[in-house]
Image: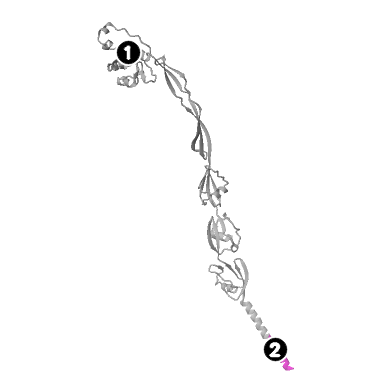
Amino acid sequence: MKNMFRNRWAKVAAQAVVLTALILGVVAYVGASKTIDVTVDGETQSVTTFGGTVADALQASEIELAAKDEVAPALDAAIDDGSTVTVNRHKTVEVVIDGETRTVGTTGLTVADIMKQLGVNGEAEISLGAGMELAALSTPIEVQTPKSVTLNVGGEEQELQTTGLTVADALADAEIEVGEADIVEPADTATALEDGMGITVVRVTTETRTATEAIPHETEKVEDDSMDRGDTDVETKGVDGVREITSQVTLHNGEVESTEVVGTEITEEPVTEVIKVGTKREEPKPEPKSSSSSSSSGGTTASGPSSGAWAALAQCESGGNWSINTGNGYYGGLQFSASSWAAAGGTQYAPLPHQASPSEQIATAERLRANGGWGHWPHCSAQLGLR
C-alpha cells in the first residue's frame, strides 16, 4: 500500500514538471512573438513574427518586395508588438496630358496621388475620379490642363481660360460660331492649344452696293453760213448722262477689304451739245484809191496800207471783232494763227492775238505783210482788191 502511494506521488510530480515546462514554454513563446499590422497598397493584414525587424516581419508574412517598392519604416528598422508597416507597390500608369501620352512610375495609391506627383493644376480636367485606386485602372488617365488664351473676334479681344485641347475646343468653350467665309488664325482649328496663345477670328461679310457716275456729254460744232463769221449759237444744249455701277464689296470686321465691279448700266444717255458757228463773211466796200497812190507803183503797197484797209480786212476776216476766239485755231480781228502771231513778234503784246488791242494786231500784221504780202489773207485781200 505504501509503495502504491509512493508511485502515485511520483507520477503526479512528473506531470507537474511537464506542465510547468509547458507553461514556461508558452510564456516564452508569447513573450518572444510580436503581432504587427502590415498594409500593402491600402490593404491591411495582421502578422505574427518572432523577428525583430521590418524585413523579418515581411518575410514571416511571405510578402516579397520588388526593387522600386516603397516600405515604411525601413527594412532594417526594429519592430515591437503593435507596430505598423506600410508597403506601397511600384506600378506604371499611362497618363495622357493634353493629348501627349506618358508612362509614369509611381508608388501612389490613387489618381490623386499621381496627379500630385506630376504637379497637375487643381483646375485641370481629369477623366477619372481623384479617389480611384491605381491598381484598379484599366484605361489611361486623361488630363486636360487649364490654359489662358486671347481671342480676337471681329476686332474685339477677350481672355479665355479653357481646358480644351485645340483651337476648335477654345472657340466652342467661348461659344463662338465661325461663319463659312470667316477667317481663323491659326487656320487649322485642330492646332493644339498652348498657354498664352492668341486666336483671331476675322468676320467676313459681302455687300452689293450701287453707285452712279456722270457720263460727260460731247460737244459738236457745226458751221452755218447763214450766220456771220464769229457768231455762235447753241442749237442743242448738252446734258451729261448717268451710269449706274453695281459692285460687290467684301468687308473684314466691317471695314472694306476689296471692291469688285459686277455690272454697269447706262440709265440716262448723254446728249451731245451742238453749237452753230457762223462762217458768213460780209463783203466790205473797197476804199477808193487816191490819185497819189494810183500814180505810184504798187498802190498802197508802196506806202503801206492805211488803218482803213486793215479795218476792212478785219471786217471780212472776223466781222470786225478784234477780240474773237471761236476755237477754230484763228484769233482776233485779222484771224492770226498762233504760230503766225508769234513769228511776227505779236507775243510782245499778248500771248494770243485776240488778247491784244486792234492797233497792236495791226502793227503785227504790218510786219507779217512785209514778209509775204497780202497772201497771208488770200480770200479777203482778193475781195478787197488789195492784191
| Residue interval drawn in magenta | 1-15
Name the outermost residue toward the top.
Answer: 291
Main secondary structure along the magenta-highlighted residues: helix
Is 14 magenta? The answer is yes
Picture quadrant where residue 282 is located = top left
Identify residue type, mark 2: Lys
Above or below, comparing residue 117 to residue 233 in the picture: below
Q: In which quadrant is the N terminus drawn?
A: bottom right
- Per the image, label 2 sits on a secondary structure element best described as helix
In x, y percent, where is residue 377? 32, 16
The one of 34 and 234 positioned closer to us in this rendering = 234
Classify residue 312 by image quadrant. Answer: top left
Q: Where residue 382 is drawn, which disc sits there? A: 1
- Which residue is at the front of the view, 276 or 179? 276
Q: Work out how far the residue at label 2 is from the one at label 1, CA to CA, in angstroms.
A: 192 Å
Comparing labels 2 and 1, the label whose residue is closer to the camera: 1
| Earlier sequence position, callout 2 versus callout 1 | 2
**Label 1: how many Cα within 10 Å (few below 14, some 14–19, many 20+):** few
**Residue 165 at x, y = what percent?**
54, 52
- Considering the numbered disc 1 on the image, is that residue within a helix, a strand or a loop? helix
Farthest residue, direction right? 1
Residue 94 in sight here: yes
Q: Label 2 belongs to which residue?
A: 11
Q: Does the magenta run of residues contain 344? A: no
